[in-house]
Image (cartoon, rainbow, N blue to C red):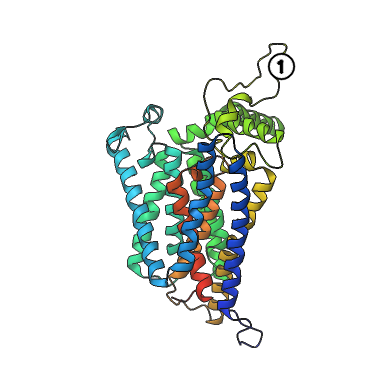
Amino acid sequence: MFTGTDGSPAVEPATVGRNIKKAIVLSYLTFLLYIFVRFMQADVFMDAEKSFLLFFTPFLLGIQIIFGFDRKQLKILNTLILMDLLFLGLYGVINHLGWKSTYVLWRPGYPQYVEEVRATGTYFCPDHFSGIMEIAMCLALGILLTRGVGTRRKIFAGLIFLVGLLGVLLSKSRGGGLTVLVICGVVITLGFAQWPVLVRWYWRAVIGGLALLALIVFSHCESSYMTRFREHFGWNQLRNKPVKEMVSGIKARLVASCRGQMISAALRAWKEKPVFGIGSGMHQNLWPHIAPSPDGNRELGIWPTFPNNEFHSYEVHSDWVQLLEEYGIVGLILFLVPFLVVLMVLLAGVNREAAEMERRDWKATGNDSYSIVLGGIFACTAMAFHSLGDFNLQMPATVWLMAAIVAIPVAYILNAGSLES
């Protein structure tokens, strides 16, 4: 609860909640107004429309949840999302273990991923299947790390977590593997706020030690998944080199990779119009004209080191870079404002729960709504990190799911000013 120094209410919680909701809505509406103007100025209407709707539709979904759902409805929706993620994961894992993802439902899988023996789930792409499984892991961890949650719900969450982790491993997604490490770091930082300080640090040491041990074991495994990391970063060729040469070599390999070239080309396009960007949805239309490297010379007939005439990048493979490229610095800043406001609301929910637990002398209360807040923070962090090197949020299904996952805990926190069940 929001209380003053004497224990009495300092500000009416409902008033605080309304003010913060207004801040979230108005800040995001400002961003939407900007991208709508850019949408109206775009040269290719259909691509601009898709880009605009990817930001507009999750906003509509989110405000319906925040302003229209009561607590019972929020719990039902959250349970449905958990069940959906579990079924998505089970299908992907079973389909891969049984049939090597040769078919996705009734359609042939993408040949490249079938040859690489990578799980794809219903996404056809293993990297995006990994992205949805990371979200599943995050929501499950929110439940597993919340004190006082019932045993059956813990078992349910444990199953979702194991399926999600197995999905990431079978997908062999490098971005997914790195995101799991980031999730582990956030868990160590925020996951034990319901415990006294000494117990909190004990669990941090235990989880951190286990994660480090798992990382060491994995890095020494001769698995096809680990091979993907070694080949991508050139570890076998660079591991005996001096540190400076190793770092420069890894950087060069990253730039030379397909993903590195796509991101480099997008950044070069952005530099031509850094303030307002190249235009809504214009990446795939302008990308063929801008090589990843600037060392070509049309007049002398010299090709750049990295041309992009062998494949076509419909997406940048980095949600953050594509936002910057198409909407410029202005668009990026306007998007970050509501994003950070929402993140601050979720973190305030964690801090409030920690203060309430301390007031209760750290006795568990069975407050399962706190698990939704914790899972929301984990999911936001995972998706924000993975989006540095992939385009999970260019797919409506994933972005709508994230909108609901964010809106549910925000509604819990702001609509009543507390996290009481």
Picture coordinates of residue 91, whole percent (x, y): 31, 45
**Left or right of 144: which side holds 286?**
right
Q: Is residue 162 above or below residue 315?
A: below
Q: Position of residue 384 (x, y in %)?
A: 56, 49
The residue furthest front is 40
Q: Residue drawn at (32%, 51%), measured in percent from left and top?
A: 87
Q: Is residue 30 visible?
A: yes
Q: Closer to the camera, 321 or 177?
A: 321
Tell me the quarter of the image containing the C terminus: bottom left
Q: Amino acid at mark 1?
A: Asn
The answer to which quarter of the image holds residue 43 is top right
Rendered location of residue 171, percent (x, y): 41, 39
Disc 1, SS: loop
**In the depicted structure, whether residue 334 falls above or below residue 42:** below
x 61%, y 52%: residue: 33
Quarter holding the N terminus is bottom right
In the picture shown, does residue 22 fall above or below 228? below
Q: Which residue sits at x=55%, y=28%? A: 258
Image location of residue 338, percent across then percent down: 61, 58
Residue extending farthest top = 300
Q: Nearer the viewer, residue 115 or 246?
A: 115
Residue located beneath label 1 in the image: 297
Asked whether the viewer can see residue 212, the reply is: no
